[in-house]
Image: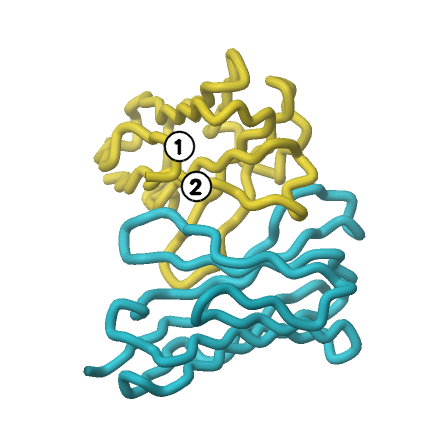
Chain colours: A cyan, B yellow
């Protein structure tokens, strides 16, 4: 069966360090992968999209990599700040299931300690 | 604000009640979606509408009934729900249903509690 796994339920790091979050998937062949941020009680907010032919994408302190051989995406936040504390969701398309809509992972809750 | 507005933000309803959730977007998007988010579970896609036509129903029980009168408005009608239906219900929109190559815009969600 198809599955999206994000590493650990929670990740705690010190302010200023780089946070690295992992998204692994099985039995998918996504053409795109997206990352979202979700704060408690609110809807997800789009951060970055990376295409299958792109190895890396950057936006300010954020960096996403996409390895279609390993079936993995890494999401990095450099110089992390307490305001970065949130749940981060990876999502990918499910074209190969016939569905044109995003499928989400469970998310990783990031806590940045001051 | 993302441009997608959901009302109400919170709703408590009994199992015999009938209520409706509303979603509105004026982003000019043609596709709208309902997702359900339960505690410690991934977002679950419920319904997809493209140009007001339902293109997907992800095996959702009939006690959930969607309605899309136009591309800007989406409703989720609820009746005879169960306590396990308590969750955060999220509406999203995108320019088109090939959602994966464009970002999705989510509303703030409706926190539903069924008692």
Residue A58: x %, y % from top left: 55, 67
> What x and y, as percent, mark residue B103?
56, 45
Q: Please tell me whether mark 2 sits on a helix, a strand or a loop.
A: strand
Q: Is residue B37 above or below residue B89?
A: below
Query: Is B79 located above or below residue B102 in the figure?
Result: above
Between B6 and B63, the one lying in front of the other is B6
At horizontal 31% and vertical 57% (from top left) the residue drawn is: A39
Question: Residue at image x 55%, y 44%?
Answer: B45
The quarter of the displayed image where residue B98 is located = top right
Residue on which the image places disc 2: B106
Residue A104 image offset from top left, x and y in percent: 55, 57
Give the class, few, some or many, for how many residues have Cα within 10 Å of label 2's Cα (few <14, many ≥20).
many
Question: Residue placed at 43% from the left, 41% from the top?
Answer: B106
> Residue B21's quadrant in the figure?
top left
Contact between marks 2 and 1 (CB within 8 A): the answer is yes
Chain identity of mark 2: B
In this image, A103 relative to A86: left or right?
Answer: right
Q: Quadrant of the C terminus of chain A?
A: bottom left
Q: Position of residue B17 (x, y in %)?
A: 28, 24
Residue sitting at x 28%, y 57%:
A40
Relative to the observer, which residue lies in front, B104 or B61?
A: B104
The chain letter for the residue carrying disc 1 is: B
How crowded pointer 1 is (Cα within 10 Å; few <14, some 14-19, many 20+) is rated as many
Q: CA distance from mark 2 to mark 1?
A: 6 Å
Q: Which residue is mark 1?
A: B4
């Amino acid at each position: 069966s198809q599955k999206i796994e994000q590493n650990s339920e929670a990740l705690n790091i010190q302010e200023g360090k780089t946070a690295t979050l992992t998204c692994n998937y099985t039995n998918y062949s996504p053409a795109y992968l997206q990352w979202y941020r979700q704060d408690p009680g609110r809807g997800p907010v789009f951060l970055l999209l990376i295409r299958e032919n792109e190895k890396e994408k950057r936006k300010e302190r954020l960096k996403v990599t996409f390895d279609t051989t390993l079936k993995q995406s890494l999401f990095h936040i450099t110089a992390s700040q307490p305001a970065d504390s949130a749940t981060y969701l990876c999502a990918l398309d499910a074209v190969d299931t016939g569905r044109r809509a995003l499928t989400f992972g469970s998310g990783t809750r990031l806590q940045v300690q001051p | 604000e993302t441009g997608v507005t959901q009302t109400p933000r919170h709703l408590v309803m009994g199992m015999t009640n009938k209520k409706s959730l509303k979603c509105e977007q004026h982003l000019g998007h043609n596709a709208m979606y309902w997702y359900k988010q339960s505690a410690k579970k991934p977002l679950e896609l419920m319904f997809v509408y493209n140009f007001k036509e339902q293109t997907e129903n992800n095996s959702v029980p009939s006690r959930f009934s969607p309605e899309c009168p136009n591309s800007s408005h989406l409703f989720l009608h609820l009746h005879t729900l169960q306590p396990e239906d308590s969750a955060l219900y999220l509406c999203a929109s995108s320019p088109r249903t090939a959602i994966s190559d464009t970002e999705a815009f989510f509303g703030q969600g409706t926190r539903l509690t069924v008692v």
